[in-house]
Amino acid sequence: MSILTSTLLPSSLLIPRRTKPINSPNNKVVFHKNDHYLNRIVPQKKKASFCIQAQAQQVEPSIPSSPIIYPTVRPKFVLFGSSIIQYSYYEGWGATLAHLYARQVDIVLRGYGGWNSRTALRVLDKVFPKNAPQQPSLVIVYFGGNDATHPQQDGNGPHVPLEEYNENMRTIFIHLQSLSENTRILFLSTPPINEEQLYGDSIPLDPPKTNESHRIYSEEGLKVCRELNIKAIDLWSAIQEEREDWKDVSFM
């Protein structure tokens, strides 16, 4: 994991030495000329601003000046995948992750709705260059839902054959493992879908995707993770096993 480093700001930005305010008539408050603590409540007349008079004061020796320690490099988490990644910031799990790690980690969103593992390979070196000055501490990867769509007769569409999907994910994982020995990888497997919600009462004879096809690609991705010792979350199983009404709760 990247080390959180810090630097010292110049002396002009040092925290000033606090001084005692001196009471004065006419609702005036006197502060030391270098005092930055001006957010205190002071007496003032309605609709009138209070008067601050800069005047040299004797500094309290008990509160010494100290430099501001400002972090310059934070650990970086990268979310890499298709629409589940892209839309995770729209009141989703990505936004929750950013909230939980606020001011601790820089979370980078690299989500591409509609992409599959094949298109992901085209940008892999650009999103994760091996010569980057800072490598991610964690990469969360999701591809599979678009790969799992059924092939079209004209050859178009996002479908990727299962064997190719295996090789693509293997290539992605091996590349990420080569970035740094401190880079951790977490794979999200293909989640289930609610076919009734997608197709209503008229499910086509050859639907573009099924919950069964998602299961197959979920298991294939998890298989690659086991072979490469990659941590993974089995979304297909976890969502359906959590509760019986998962279709109503998970898909709205």
Image (cartoon, rainbow, N blue to C red):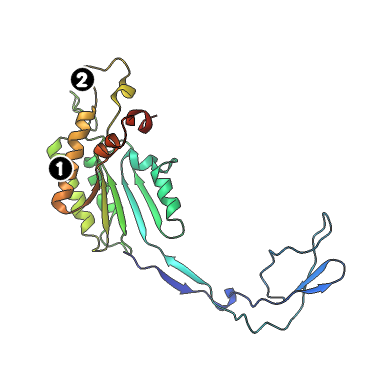
* Residue 163 or residue 218, whichever sits in front: 218
Residue 178 locus on image (x, y percent)? 21, 59
Q: Quadrant of residue 161?
A: top left
Tally of marks = 2
List the residue tagged with mark 1: 166
Query: Is label 1 in a helix, a strand or a loop?
Result: helix
Q: Name which quarter of the figure residue 156 lies in.
A: top left
Residue pictured at 20% horizontal, 30% vertical: 213
Residue 1 horizontal side relative to residue 14, left or right? left
- Give the left or right position of residue 157, taking residue 76 as reference: left
Q: Nearer the viewer, residue 183 or 64?
A: 64
Q: Position of residue 4 (x, y in %)?
A: 39, 67
Q: Look at the image and tell me in which quarter the C terminus lies.
A: top left
Position of residue 59 relative to residue 89, above or below, is below
Query: Which amino acid, by three-letter code, is at mark 2?
Result: Asp
Instruction: Using the rendered image of the protein, determine whether residue 240 is visible from the camera's viewpoint.
Output: yes
Q: Toward which corner of the image does residue 64 lie, by quadrant?
A: bottom right
Q: Position of residue 58 (x, y in %)?
A: 72, 84
Front residue of 59/178: it is: 59
Residue 112 is at least partly visible in this image:
no
- State the image coordinates of residue 168 (x, y, percent, origin top left): 18, 44
Q: Residue at x 30, y 27 (%)?
A: 194
Task: Check the image and name the residue furthest to the right.
Answer: 26
Q: Residue 140's mark?
A: none
Q: Which residue is mark 2?
A: 206
Relative placement, left or right, of 247 versus 237 is right
Residue in the picture at 20% in, 20% down: 206
User: Alpha carbon of mark 2 to alpha carbon of mark 1: how far?
Assistant: 24 Å
Q: Is residue 125 left or right of residue 14?
A: left
Q: Is residue 73 above or below residue 161?
A: below
Sequence-wise first label, 2 or 1: 1
Determine whether the residue tagged by mark 2 lies in a helix, strand or loop.
loop
